[in-house]
Image (spheres, rainbow, N blue to C red):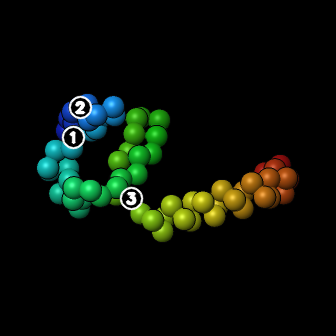
Amino acid sequence: MAMTAKVTKVGNSSALILPKELMAKLNLEQGDSVSLTEVAAGVVISPYDRQKERQLEIAKKVMRENRNMLKKLAE
């Protein structure tokens, strides 16, 4: 399903106007937050998941703290 969205000026910022069909498909309402993930083909938009964000923060911390061990395991 291909859709287009419009970027518009809001004060000194920009906003992406999502079609109502996409809002419904993602179960989003005005004021909700979304996650934007850069992938090889572009950007993926998904509903913001606070628990997933916390898990990613923990994983990054563990990887940072255990960088040398992870390098050894990768060999």
Q: Position of residue 26 (x, y in %)?
A: 25, 57
Q: Report if the CB atoms under discs 2 and 1 are less than 8 Å apart.
A: yes
| Location of mark 3 (residue) | 48
Q: Residue furthest left?
A: 20
Viewer-side residue, 72 vs 50 = 50
Distance CA(mark 3)–CA(mark 1): 17 Å
Q: Amino acid at mark 2?
A: Thr
Lower position in the chain sequence, tag 2 or tag 1: 2
The circle drawn on residue 8 is: 2
| Location of mark 1 (residue) | 17
Q: Nearer the viewer, mark 2 or mark 1?
A: 2
- Count of marks, rendered view: 3
Viewer-side residue, 41 vs 32 = 32
Viewer-side residue, 56 vs 74 = 56
CA neighbours of label 1 inside 10 A, class few (<14), some (14 to 19), many (20+): few
Is label 1 in a helix, a strand or a loop?
A: strand
Is label 2 in a helix, a strand or a loop?
A: strand
